[in-house]
Amino acid sequence: QVQLVESGGGLVQPGGSLRLSCVASGSLFSILTMSWYRQAPGKQRELVASIGTSGITTYGDSVKGRFTISRDNAKKTVYLQMNSLRVEDAAIYYCGGGGRPPAHWGQGTQVTVSS
């Protein structure tokens, strides 16, 4: 089993930055595609970014050029650096592991973007 724990969410002003972290338990992290999804109230969960085992990344159109996903296999951690945040980026951000859609999910971390 894989357990995922996110952290790093919070309140930020428009134009600000946050870095989310997701720590995985178990021994499978290095062979898993890891992703970040988000879900805003009344909206479907959407892919924000994913990173494969080789480091190849994919981004949702709305975050390209602003967000960066990375991973540290030694620390079993995937990161999401979010810059130039907009009000519409506010959502619960979920870490996912193992495919698209992910087989494993974290509990989510809230990101609020407001002045």
Image (tube, helix red, strand yellow):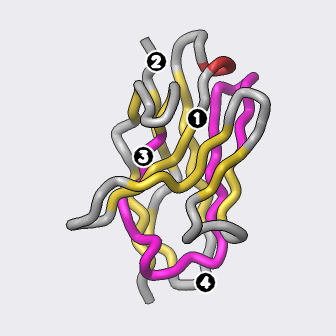
Which numbered circle lies on residue 15?
Answer: 4
Separation (CA) of disc 1 from disc 2? 12 Å
Q: Amino acid at mark 3?
A: Tyr
Which of discs 4 and 1 lies nearer the camera? The answer is: 1
The answer to whether marks 3 and 2 mark residues whose Cβ atoms lie closer than 8 Å is no
**61 sits to left or right of 109:** right
Residue at 31% in and 65% down? 40
Query: Is 92 in front, or is 101?
Result: 101
Indicate yes or no whether the magenta region holds residue 83.
yes
Alpha carbon of mark 3 to alpha carbon of mark 4: how far?
21 Å
Where residue 101 appears, x then y in whole percent? 43, 36
Number of the label disc, if any, that sits on residue 94: 3
**Label whose residue precedes the other's in the sequence (4 or 2):** 2
Q: Residue under label 1, please give it.
A: 34
Mark 3 or mark 1: whose residue is earlier in sequence: 1
| Of the pair 35 and 113, the residue shown nearer to us | 35
Provide the residue designation for mark 2. Answer: 2
Please report the bounds of the magenta region as a residue range.
70-95
Mark toward the start of the polypeptide (1 vs 2):
2
At mark 2, the secondary structure is loop
- Dot 3 or dot 4: first in sequence order is 4
Mark 1 packing: few (<14 Cα in 10 Å), some, or many (20+)? many
Q: Nearer the viewer, residue 43 or 112?
A: 43
Residue 10: x percent and y percent? 45, 64
| Residue type (three-letter) at the residue carrying disc 2 | Val
Percent x, y of residue 108: 37, 46
Residue drawn at 64 percent across, 46 percent down: 79
Please say if the residues under marks 3 and 1 sit with CB atoms less than 8 Å apart: no
The residue mark sitting in front, 1 or 2, is 1
